[in-house]
Image: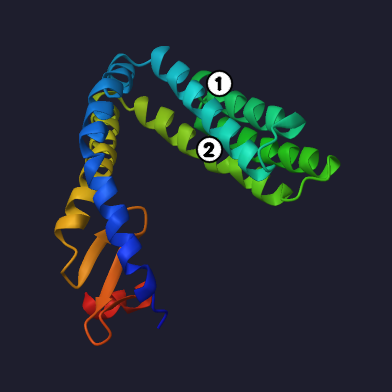
Amino acid sequence: MTTVAENDGTERRLALAELDRLPLRIQSAMVLGPLPIAAIWFGSPWLPLLTGLAAAVMAWEWGRLCRQGHFGETGVVLVGVVLAVVATTALLGAGLAIAAALVGAAAVFWTARKHADSSPQWTALGALWVALPCVCLLWLAREGAVGRVTLLWVLAVVWTTDVGAPAIGQCDRKSDLGIVPRQGFRVRDHTDDVWGDTSKLPDYL
């Protein structure tokens, strides 16, 4: 078992800091929430446009992360690939978009290798990691009212988890199974009074 008793005080301070930011999380959800909700409800072209914008931002962030803060030609190709996949989904359907994502990931990998990037496989994986959820989102949006309701439910789950997890984790610090902000589920070992690793999780369930 990996013990982290020396970090317990730090974890408590982080949990309190997360709890202090709870009002900001709620306000952010209230300000940013109407835009994706409206895009989902009104559909094309608003949802594909918003999805493309979000995909471009995620690809930009992933490209910089994989290249130690530098964007470069590999990042440009990565952003171009995810935008092309989003456009293909909106105009031609999910099947061709998945094929485009695979070809695009190969193009990202080749570009990263060409420029001797440190982690070309991770950069290419990011193309799939960003593009495929966008394909699924737009595919669901084509399913009429059922698809729209499903997407709204997904947003509600994500926002509720993001806003509520820090508060619930802080209130549940003394239980065997708690939610530690930014760390997920952790299991408390009463014999050593430390946080144990998550390999013990099945025994508690």
The residue depicted at 39 percent of the width and 78 percent of the height is 3
The residue depicted at 32 percent of the width and 21 percent of the height is 40
Gap in angstroms between the C-alphas marked 2 and 1: 14 Å
Using residue 45 as the reference point, say whether residue 205 is left or right of it. Answer: left
Residue 197 in sight here: no
Describe the element under mark 2 as helix, strand or loop. Answer: helix
- Please state, as top left, top right, bottom left or bottom right, where the N terminus lies in the image: bottom left
Residue 105, horizontal then vertical, whole percent: 67, 40
Residue 79, horizontal then vertical, whole percent: 63, 28
The residue pinned by badge 1 equals 87
Residue kind at label 2, given as amino acid type: Val
Residue 156 in sight here: yes
Q: Are marks 2 and 1 in contact (CB under 8 Å)?
A: no
Q: Earlier in the sequence, mark 2 or mark 1?
A: 1
Using residue 78 as the reference point, say whether residue 176 is left or right of it. Answer: left
Using residue 7 as the reference point, say whether residue 171 is left or right of it. Answer: left
Q: Is residue 52 above or below residue 75?
A: above
Q: Residue furthest bottom?
A: 191
Residue kind at label 1, given as amino acid type: Ala
The residue depicted at 30 percent of the width and 32 percent of the height is 151
Residue 203, horizontal then vertical, whole percent: 26, 81
Image-quadrant location for residue 80: top right
- Please state, as top left, top right, bottom left or bottom right, where the C terminus lies in the image: bottom left
| Crowd around label 2: few <14 · some 14–19 · many ≥20 (10 Å) | many
Q: Nearer the viewer, residue 180 or 102?
A: 180
The residue depicted at 23 percent of the width and 27 percent of the height is 27
The residue pinned by badge 2 equals 130
